[in-house]
Image (cartoon, coloured by chain):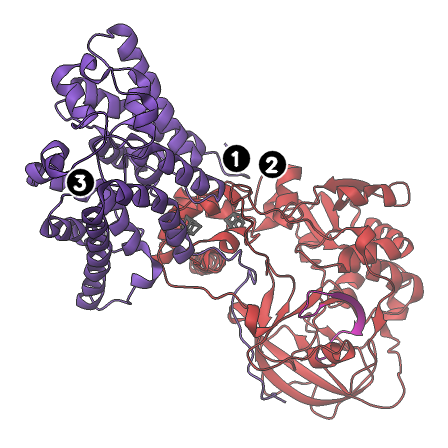
Amino acid sequence: MNSKKTLIVSHAPFWHDGSGIPERSYHTIIAALPAAIAGIAYYGAPALGVICMAMSTAILWELLLNRAMRRPITVGDGNAALIGLLLGMMLPASTPWWVVLVGTFLAIVIGMQIFGGIGANPFNPVVLAIAILMISYKGHLDFDAGLVNFSLDFPTTSEPLAALKAFGPAAVEHLHPLDLLMGRQVGGLGSANGLALVIGGIYLMIRGIIRWEVCVSFIVGTYITAMLFNMADPSRFADPVFHLLTGYTLFGAFFLATESTTSPVNFVPMLIYGTLGGVMTVLIRNIGIYVDGVIFAILLINLINPLVDKIRPKAIGKVA
Amino acid sequence: MRKRSFFGLSTPCFKYELATDASASPVAIPAPEQVTLYIKKPFKQASSTLKVGTPVQTGQRLVLNENDDVYAISSVTGTVCAMAPFLADYGNAWTAVTIKTEGNEVIDPEFSAAAEAPSLETLTRFLAAGPGEPDFAPLMDERNPVSTIIIYGGNADLLIDTSLYVLKNNIEAINAGIEVLRKATGIEEIVIAVPEESVQNYSGHLDARIQPFSSQYPYAQPLMILNSLTGRLPDETGMASLGIHFLRAESVAAIGKAFSTGCLTIEKNVTVIDKQGVKHMARAKIGTPVAALLKAFGVEVNDQDKIIFGGPMTGNAIYSEDLPLGPDTDAVMVQDKSIIPLYSDYPCINCGDCVRVCPANVPVNLLIRFLEAGQYAEGADLYDLYACIECGLCSYVCVSRIPIFQYIKLAKYELGRTLSAEEMNEQ
Ligand code: SF4
Ligand code: SF4
């Protein structure tokens, strides 16, 4: 009585909305590209070199690890390419190739694959890699030193945050927010152009790929904390807009803090998480020893993520 | 398959089919050459009453052995031409009885004699294998008395018209059924659950309280309705303790019709959803092979297509066109192989889409980690496995394409099994 037709059998549901990890990665790459391209426009071929190096080595590390661990090849999902791109965008355009290579190794291998690959990383791999690079290769990650041989048509030739740390707000008073927004400042090759980052970030928010709660609360947290410091003592602490537009703030808000694996999924925890990230950023900048607090602030909130995400709505049907 | 919209912030929103959408009168499917019926008992070689060659009449109770209380109702007149074991979902062992249709239809007289006075015994003896497959056992369980019967007029899944169609077109039969139920069980509180937009069509005509539910998916999921009525959900011991019993509208209509005419209903309304998503309403004998049903609407099934009993979110895929329409099959859906979504073995990336879409506030992202590791008890204790009302939306949106819903069903099934094994040990 059996017919010869073979039917496919699987479990419900039989519809899917068509989302997938490759789509997510590629949309995020698309969103990050405007800022990366702006960086290439400012810094030229070296910037392009760093980005290409970062993306290709990230993919290579993932491929090697997949092979070594005898697991399915996962480079096709675009996640490694995305990590490479984001890492490259945070480096100075002058980064030597081997630092990039070490950076992507740290991100892909130490940051992600040894924990079990995508979805299992306790820290944002990009942030972890940059943090280790910052501590290990201080000189190469120093924007002022690195970019000294570039002829840049910017209002200032030193990194605004470093200048602020060394000489106080008076040293950065002449910087116009519009210049900062347009990326006319010394910084990471793809993470200083606020306008492009905001455009990319809004694209991701609309598509529902990143959690708007996290980035909005990160920005609000940064702004309010910086404003409180500024109100308390304007002669020592810069104004909030300056903090928003310099360093990795916007990049962190849109592309780093929102990394899905290491951020909460419930509404209230997302707000706490983002706000805390913003607050920590300014705290580190204003009273810590590091020039830019975004990296360590994000590592810190990654750490508290499992804890805050325990705050969640009660499931239905529960008595008591 | 529906696609994600460009604006990914809004959660997907589906509406149930409403009574006003229900299609015109159903296409009657002619009696097939043979029907297959399931008796939900394991097949043992020697059956004292049924053998190949046994003649049967329409409406006859088919039992494997004298005095069995598990039976099927023959939907045709003919002879048994095959009997075989059948392995159903979740490892249930049943018996498949195939009957070859022969000669003129003769109605079995046994029921009409019993139909004089409605009683729970008569219901249990004759109607439990009818349309909608009503379960009367909880009504007889004295330890957990049922206080409310819910006549379920919605469809648990999308695209299905069946239940509302029956409700709309069989008001008299349903009223008769309600009366029978009241007489037989003594339960006064009978509630009819229908989508809110359809309420105005019924109020006043029906002899029961109407309880509207939202017409947005998944608010007609039986467990969701249970929750909105009682504020609770059943745990691993099942629905028994809540004092509520569900019967489908189609069952109640069949009960009403049976007692007023003296004949059992042996036909079933089904929504047939073809590859283009076009819906047709059919009326076919229970036991009709799916192939005969699909042929009537010119639906061609090719290699690697998918046939689903039920709707797109919660149905069951079947493996052969020869499988018969069961008494509880409300819809048959065919998917072309080009649109079948595939699942993957990626881990959860914690994107949170499932959590945002879940109507029951289940922390799916955490739950799935435990279920994937086989830690079902932890999932139930810490991560609200039993709050899941089984809508399938989490799997629908999962970026990693994890078969979340399958894991949830499996976990519930496995926990239920452990529980019954423990009970057996205690005894
Ligand atoms: S866990 Fe999934 S299937 Fe269960 S109620 Fe939530 S979304 Fe629906
Ligand atoms: S939708 Fe899938 S990948 Fe996203 S959090 Fe839920 S289970 Fe994880």
According to the rendering, which colour does chain A have?
purple
Q: Which residues are magenta?
A: B273-289
Does residue A27 appear in this view?
yes
* Tag shown at residue A92: 3
- Amino acid type, callout 3: Pro
For the point 50% across and 47% down, which residue is it? B386
Which residue is outermost to the bottom? B53
Q: Is residue A179 above or below residue A39?
A: above
* Tag shown at residue A319: 1
- Compute the Cα span from label 3 to label 1: 56 Å
Callout 1 touching callout 2 (CB < 8 Å) = yes
Mark 3 and mark 1, same subunit?
yes
Q: Tell me the subunit letter for badge 2.
A: B
Q: Nearer the viewer, residue B389 or A14?
A: A14
- Left or right of B102? Residue A41 is left
Q: Which chain is red?
A: B
Residue B89: % across, % down: 55, 69
Q: Quadrant of the N terminus of chain A?
A: bottom right
- Amino acid type, callout 2: Gly
| Local crowd size for mark 3, using a 10 Å CA cut-off: few (<14), some (14–19), many (≥20) | many
- Amino acid type, callout 1: Val
| Local crowd size for mark 1, using a 10 Å CA cut-off: few (<14), some (14–19), many (≥20) | few
Q: Nearer the viewer, residue B227 or B163?
A: B163
* Helix, strand or loop at mark 2: loop
Q: Nearer the viewer, residue A158 or A213?
A: A158
For the point 66% across and 70% down, which residue is it? B275
- Left or right of A28? Residue B102 is right
Q: Is residue A64 above or below residue B62?
A: above
Q: Which residue is mark 2?
A: B231
* Helix, strand or loop at mark 3: loop
